[in-house]
Image: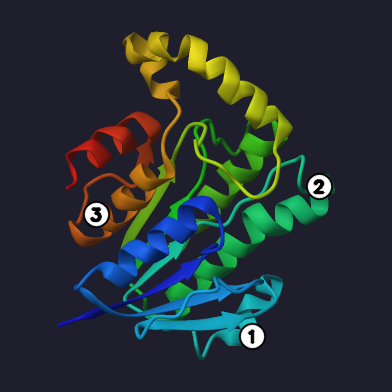
Amino acid sequence: MAKTAIVLGATGLTGNMLLKMLLDDERYDHVTVFGRNSVELKHPKLEEYIIDLFQLDHYANKFKADEVYCCIGTTKAKTSNKDTYVKIDYGIPVAAAKLCKENGIPTFVVISALGAKKNSKVFYNRTKGLMEAAVLDLQIPQTYILQPSLITGEREEIRLGEHIFKILMNFIKPIFRFGDLKRYQPIAPETIAKTMVWVANNDYESVRIKSKKIQELGEQIN
């Protein structure tokens, strides 16, 4: 029987790749997108709702599927106000997870970040860690939290810190192939997207999936 999926963050780098994978996947016959902006894509499987994601709970009657994929995230450079930052990186994923719980959606897959920890002194890591804890407290049967390292690829907006880091990585990335440093190796958005779909369809045993394992799984998926 064909499945249905919901995607949040489908206009982002990873989310857009994920959306296209789901639309091309014969296991799915319907994909719903909730977002602030249109994905500007026409497809017979696609249904799109342009909404205020801070009011996601207002769309509970539309929030129905077999799986939910949450690719929501921002940066300090893009969202300097900490309250708004928390509303995005914590509030939206947790609201989506709550709707999963309320509507009996058994699978929730969300992108977090490597280093996420709820008691971290680093604001970014703490916010992600608190989001993870809130999601896990809901006890959705199949919950998968992906913790990627720096995500490669070109975004529409300029993230100066990431851009500089990526230039440096071109010179030093060979050392990330060895030992403990391998966990920090930058990862491609396509690899993350492929892994998200794979774990949702294969009853993967781990809840938190760190960047190194994401990379390993992605390399094994055709």
Q: Is residue 38 left or right of residue 196?
A: right
Q: Nearer the viewer, residue 40 or 190?
A: 40
Residue 171 coordinates in the image, percent (x, y): 50, 11
- Looking at the rendering, which quadrant does residue 154 occupy? top right
Above or below: residue 144 compared with residue 38: above
Q: Label 3, label 1: how many angstroms apart (C-alpha)?
A: 30 Å
- For marks 2 and 3, the one nearer the N-term is 2
Q: Secondary structure at mark 2?
A: helix
- Assess disc 3: are there few (<14), some (14-19) or many (≥20) residues with their C-alpha within 10 Å of its C-alpha: some
Residue 33 coordinates in the image, percent (x, y): 49, 75
Residue to which mark 2 is pinned = 82
Residue drawn at point x = 41 percent, y = 57 percent: 17
- For marks 3 and 1, the one nearer the N-term is 1
Q: Amino acid at mark 3?
A: Trp
Residue drawn at point x = 31 percent, y = 76 percent: 66
Q: Nearer the viewer, residue 93 or 50?
A: 50
Q: Amino acid at mark 1?
A: His
Residue drawn at point x = 45 percent, y = 37 percent: 148
Residue to which mark 1 is pinned = 58
Q: Label 1, label 2: how many angstroms apart (C-alpha)?
A: 24 Å
Residue 211 coordinates in the image, percent (x, y): 39, 33
Q: Which mark is residue 198?
A: 3
Q: Are the residues flagged by discs 1 and 2 in contact, CB closer than 8 Å? A: no
Residue drawn at point x = 65 percent, y = 61 percent: 91
